[in-house]
Amino acid sequence: MRNTDIIVDVRNLAVEYGRGRKTLRAVDDVSFSVHRGETLAIIGESGSGKSSTAHALAGLVGTAAGSITTNLDSPAFGKGGSSHLIFQNPTSALNTRMASWACVAEPMAPGRVRIPQSLRPKAVELLRRVGLGAELADRLPTQLSGGQRQRVTIARALASKAPLILCDEPVASLDVSLQEEVLQLLAELRDEHDLTYIFISHDLGSVARIADRVAVMYLGRIVEIGPVATVLRTPSHPYTQALLAAAPHIELERRSRRKALVRGELPDPRNPPSGCRFRTRCPFAMDRCASESPALRAASNSAHSSACHLSSPATSTGISNLPQ
Ligand code: SF4
């Protein structure tokens, strides 16, 4: 990919909540870039900073340090020129007093209290594209199922014409069968509309299905980043290995699963461990890990980096049933 294809470039990003001694640095020194048309997944446990990163990109929270540079105003990205956030809980993203078609049309009529009827045909067309018939257009969001509501939010994202879609756990609240359908829909729309996704998830199965690259976050920092097939087949960082070992629907060689399971609880993010933040749970921790923070550096190839003093790919914990 060429640098001119970069749609968003994040450098040394920090996001903080609270003040003084109670300050929580949820994102710390995070850097990555996303290219046009690709899907970058960001995974990690609750408290890893993945959603805070997405919310900073959407402008919902301020940045304490670093920069976010976007190329969204470029003529190459059409009229949208912005990003759009799809939330985990579709109900919170929709006005429950508006008909579904009006919820979809709202981004096409910014600042308008009443959504013009003239936008209804386009909204109904978008609803159809996400698999919702015209008979559902007048229903309130509360009269739809959870899966239908999430489809309305996806149609809304299309209506915004935003070239960058931030998907914050978009299938986490859905049944497993619906998750697959919505992931398939997101992939189709990405290809049809040349969209770029940043896909926040704690589910490796979803990430394996939709992402081109994946960044693994732990306690506010990226610990591993690279092509999704490389990271999931040959995880380099002990935390990524532990996440894979704990994924019940991903096949692992049994002995590796026992060995790689993560120990203990997530440390208090207000008081993270010195050196490597994963050291209190890492089965391979050494003295050096307490005093020296490992830098993110290339492991097996230049596109695959990990932040560990033992930065060699551990092929024995790779997964064997990745979708092709
Ligand atoms: S730097 Fe040390 S503690 Fe951190 S992941 Fe690597 S071996 Fe484990």
Image (cartoon, rainbow, N blue to C red):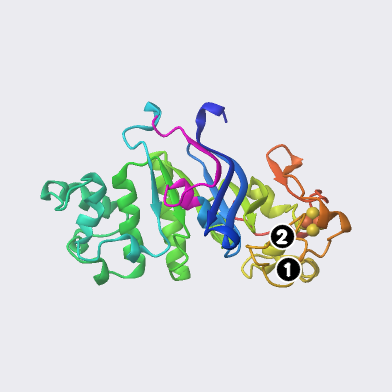
The single residue placed furthest to the left in the displayed view is 117
Q: Which residue is mark 1?
A: 262
Left or right placement of residue 244 versus residue 67 in this view: right
Q: Answer yes or no: is residue 159 visible.
A: yes
Whether the residues at callouts 2 and 1 have beta carbons within 8 Å, the answer is: yes
Q: Nearer the viewer, residue 148 or 75?
A: 75
Ligand 1 - quadrant of the structure image: bottom right
Q: Which residue is mark 2?
A: 239
Residue type, mark 2 in image = Tyr
Residue at image point 19% right, 61% down: 99
Residue at image point 32% right, 47% down: 158
Residue type, mark 1 in image = Val
Kind of element beneath mark 2: helix
The part of the image, by quadrant, that contains residue 203 is: bottom right
The part of the image, by quadrant, that contains residue 89 is: bottom left
Q: Answer yes or no: is residue 208 visible.
A: no
Where residue 137 sits: x, y (%)? 20, 60
Q: Nearer the viewer, residue 162 or 316?
A: 162
Q: Nearer the viewer, residue 17 or 222?
A: 17
- Which quadrant of the rendered structure holds the N terminus? top right
Left or right placement of residue 238 versus residue 194 in this view: right
Residue numbers of the magenta segment: 54-73
Mark before the other along the chain sequence, 2 or 1:
2
In the depicted structure, whether residue 22 falls above or below residue 54: below
- The answer to whether the residue bearing label 2 lies less than 8 angstroms from the nearest atom of ligand 1 is yes
Q: Is residue 257 magenta?
A: no
Left or right placement of residue 97 versus residue 66 in this view: left
Where residue 226 sits: x, y (%)? 65, 45
